[in-house]
């Protein structure tokens, strides 16, 4: 059924108990591995957005979008094409630093627009909101200093103003 | 659309007033026009049962013996009428006993509302007595579920549940109501509207002209079209439209196990059931076809056999109500989402407008081929001499009830396949079987529910001895409510279909399939329930007991002691191409060349 690729889906859902289980359960049941999943509130209190990243074939992603639409709590689903969207993720990372290397690490942080969130005797806690690929580079560059802990939130995505109409997977588009 | 009638709605509105959550459930059932429901009381659902007795209402409750029975009875009712079936259970084990019927209703697209009691709100999550997270358990097998949070949400959840269960592609919906909310008083008002922003079915209405034109274009170029019809036609009540389309096309029509009755078996264009135990002519018709016009069917593996080898030269037109079925298993060249009673007439008009003499000439050759296969390779069996063949029982029942309003219900296994092969069913909702889930034990309760839905019909449950023993406790329900369905136990003393696979594919090692056909003694068992109990071991006895059972109009069990080794043929072995069918050897058999 073709090659697998990464796909980012953004699902607008009703903010109700159980909705995350329903969405996550659907992926499990249909045999998809979720790479990353982020859920959070939107501009409306009764709506949330679940952003899911999966590695699967084009045929599979079409199937899963259709299945998502069948969930009563799911209002809309978009497949977010990377070049049509802003994608961001938050990284919290705690790095081992002694006094003489602290400024070095802080310079690196500046380069990546990361903020110092906490300073300890021998540690530095950095926060960084960036494109997930850039976060990966940042982490890689920090590795030699000694990463004590690193947590990422999972990516969220939003279509750019310039995104062509057809890039979103509307309900009718999934029919064909 | 909801089932509510104006009068029921008016009545519900008249009931508006102060009441507790339990009574609100009953008022909601009335508002939805529910006349009957099935269930068993228990701790967490006690307030509802108290309200059944304490208040004046129009909903009959039927007490069953096991909650699974309640679920299948509600399914039998729903399948016989097209209305939503309703079943009720308490929390914990009561609710988990509904899991099988809910899964069955999900796979066979049956509208079902299951109402379960839940432990009081303050105990949820504490592993309280009889607590089970039933909304969590059923999550992958319901269309939707509600765990009601406040008493004011009860009417909203009930209205939404009925709407979701019946609209679009029908399915099961569960409403879980904590006990304290059933006891809480509030001002009941039946909501005017349903607030479900993520559930929109309006867009299904209407016909996409481009898709109709594309379909008509494929049809105009096809030489060997076949209509591949599934259970969606029955849910859409589109039998009349299907018959008109088939006659306009003059194309053969194959009906899946779920679609039996969606197109008349006795219609000259019918080639009956395809698939694992379908007719050779249905499978060969599909295999040789250059265009499958798929209507409310889903390319199930029991139909297609090996998917890659299924109808290899055919283009696919797919009409359905569920977008997720399009191109799920087989790529659709043209697809159309809609209500079949709108889309099928549109296709018919387009076909008639496109009449083309060359196509018709080719089509006559095609129909001649199909009729030839049908003539030469009918369903057939060897009469048993002294032993009673199960196929004979099917034919005898079919003959005995021809011309009467009969509803046929089955369990799952060999008897189900013989019934599908040998019964002639010409109307929708007169064949009720568990297809997708393949639930043994479906027959007895589903037959009771169907009979309660249609009291004047002759309901016959063609059951296996293995299946019958899974739900036979419901004979008590049948007797207590005088439900006269006939339960025909095709007793070969085996888990017969499993045994058949063991004989054919597992070196005749009959591992754990022998049921010893004389335990229990079905006649003594049925008598103990106060049923009419009959037995037949020969063809003559079979004829006699069938006549007696049909005349009796009371709950009846017949023990048909049939040939223990009879197998269901033809058969497509699992994983084989659908045109490669096993069969017994017959004299004058065609060589199946070129097929």
Image (tube, coloured by chain):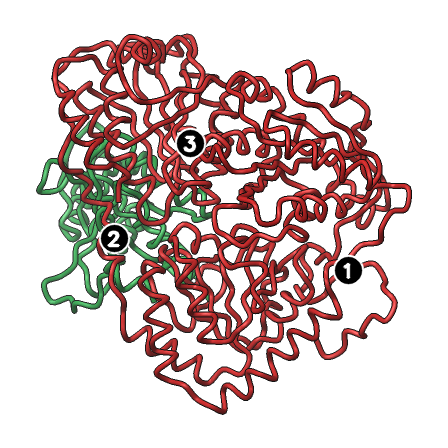
Chain colours: A green, B red
As drawn, is B314 to the left or to the right of B14? right
Chain ID, mark 3: B
The residue at the point 34 percent across, 39 percent down is: B165
Marks 2 & 1 on one chain? no
Chain ID, mark 1: B
Query: Which quarter of the figure has residue B539?
Result: top right
Res B106 visible: yes
B65, above or below B262, in the image: above
What separation in Å lies between label 2 and label 3 (alpha carbons)?
A: 24 Å
Q: For label 1, count other residues whose C-alpha is less than 10 Å away and answer few (under 14), some (14-19) or many (20+).
A: some
Q: Quadrant of the C terminus of chain A?
A: bottom left
What separation in Å lies between label 3 and label 1 (alpha carbons)?
A: 38 Å
Q: Which residue lies under the disc numbered 2?
A: A77
| Residue B226: x %, y % from top left | 53, 71
Q: Looking at this rendering, what residue extends furthest in the front direction? A: B551
Q: Which residue lies under the disc numbered 1?
A: B582
């Amino acid at each position: 059924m073709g090659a697998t690729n990464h796909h980012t889906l953004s699902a607008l859902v009703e903010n109700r108990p159980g909705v995350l289980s329903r969405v996550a359960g659907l992926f499990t049941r249909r045999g998809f591995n979720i790479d990353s999943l982020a859920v959070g509130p939107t501009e409306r209190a009764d709506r949330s957005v679940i952003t899911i990243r999966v590695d699967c074939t084009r045929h599979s992603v079409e199937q899963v979008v259709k299945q998502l639409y069948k969930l009563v709590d799911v209002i809309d689903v978009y497949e977010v094409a990377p070049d049509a969207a802003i994608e961001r993720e938050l990284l919290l990372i705690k790095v081992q630093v002694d006094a003489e290397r602290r400024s070095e690490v802080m310079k690196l942080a500046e380069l990546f627009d990361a903020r110092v969130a906490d300073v300890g005797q021998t540690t530095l806690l950095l926060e960084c909101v960036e494109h997930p690929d850039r976060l990966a580079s940042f982490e890689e560059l920090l590795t030699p200093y000694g990463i004590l802990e690193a947590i990422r939130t999972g990516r969220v995505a939003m279509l750019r103003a310039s995104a062509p109409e057809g890039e979103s997977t509307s309900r009718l588009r999934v029919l064909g | 659309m909801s089932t509510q009638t104006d009068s029921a709605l008016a009545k519900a509105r008249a009931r508006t007033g102060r009441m507790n959550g339990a009574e609100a459930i009953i008022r909601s059932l009335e508002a939805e026009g529910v006349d009957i429901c099935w269930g068993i009381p228990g701790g967490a659902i006690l307030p509802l049962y108290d309200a059944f007795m304490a208040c004046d209402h129009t909903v009959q409750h039927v007490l069953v013996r096991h909650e699974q029975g309640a679920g299948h009875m509600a399914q039998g009712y729903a399948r016989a009428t097209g209305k939503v079936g309703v079943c009720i259970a308490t929390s914990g084990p009561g609710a988990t006993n509904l899991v099988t019927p809910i899964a069955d209703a999900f796979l066979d697209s049956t509208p079902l509302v299951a109402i379960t009691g839940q432990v009081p709100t303050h105990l949820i999550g504490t592993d309280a007595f009889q607590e089970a997270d039933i909304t969590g358990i059923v999550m992958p097998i319901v269309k939707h579920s509600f765990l009601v949070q406040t008493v004011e949400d009860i009417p909203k959840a009930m209205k939404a549940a009925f709407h979701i269960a019946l609209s679009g592609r029908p399915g099961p919906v569960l409403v879980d109501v904590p006990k304290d909310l059933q006891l809480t008083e509030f001002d009941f008002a039946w909501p005017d509207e349903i607030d479900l922003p993520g559930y929109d079915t309006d867009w299904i209405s209407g016909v996409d002209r481009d898709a109709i034109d594309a379909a008509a274009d494929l049809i105009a170029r096809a030489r060997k079209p076949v209509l591949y019809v599934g259970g969606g036609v029955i849910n859409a009540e589109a039998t009349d439209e299907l018959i008109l389309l088939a006659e306009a096309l003059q194309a053969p029509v194959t009906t899946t196990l779920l679609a039996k009755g969606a197109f008349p078996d006795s219609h000259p264009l019918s080639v009956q059931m395809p698939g694992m135990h379908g007719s050779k002519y249905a499978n060969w018709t599909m295999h040789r076809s250059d265009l499958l016009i798929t209507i409310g069917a889903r390319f199930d593996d029991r139909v297609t056999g090996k998917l890659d080898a299924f109808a290899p030269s055919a283009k696919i037109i797919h009409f359905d109500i569920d977008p997720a079925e399009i191109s799920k298993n087989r790529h659709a060249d043209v697809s159309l989402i809609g209500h079949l009673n709108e889309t099928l007439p549109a296709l018919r008009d387009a076909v008639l407008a496109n009449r083309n003499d060359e196509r018709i000439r080719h089509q006559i050759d095609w129909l001649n081929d199909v009729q030839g296969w049908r003539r030469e390779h009918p369903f057939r069996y060897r009469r048993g001499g002294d032993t009673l063949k199960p196929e004979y029982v099917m034919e005898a029942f079919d003959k005995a009830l021809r011309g009467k309003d009969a509803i046929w219900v089955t369990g799952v296994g060999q008897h189900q396949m013989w019934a599908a092969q040998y019964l002639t069913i010409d109307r929708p909702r007169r064949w009720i079987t568990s297809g997708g889930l393949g639930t043994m034990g479906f027959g007895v309760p589903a037959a009771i529910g169907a009979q309660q839905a249609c009291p004047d019909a002759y309901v016959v449950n063609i059951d296996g001895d293995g299946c019958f023993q899974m739900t036979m406790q419901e004979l008590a329900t049948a007797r207590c409510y005088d439900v006269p369905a006939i339960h025909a136990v095709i007793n070969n003393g085996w888990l017969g279909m499993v045994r058949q696979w063991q004989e054919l594919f597992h070196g005749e090692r009959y591992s754990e399939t022998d049921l010893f056909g004389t335990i229990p003694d079905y006649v003594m068992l049925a008598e103990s329930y106060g049923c009419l109990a009959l037995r037949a071991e020969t063809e003559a006895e079979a004829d006699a007991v069938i006549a007696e059972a049909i005349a009796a109009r009371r709950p009846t069990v017949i023990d048909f002691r049939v040939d223990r080794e009879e197998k269901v043929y033809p058969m497509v072995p699992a994983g084989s191409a659908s045109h490669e069918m096993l069969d017994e050897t017959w004299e004058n058999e065609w060589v199946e060349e070129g097929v």
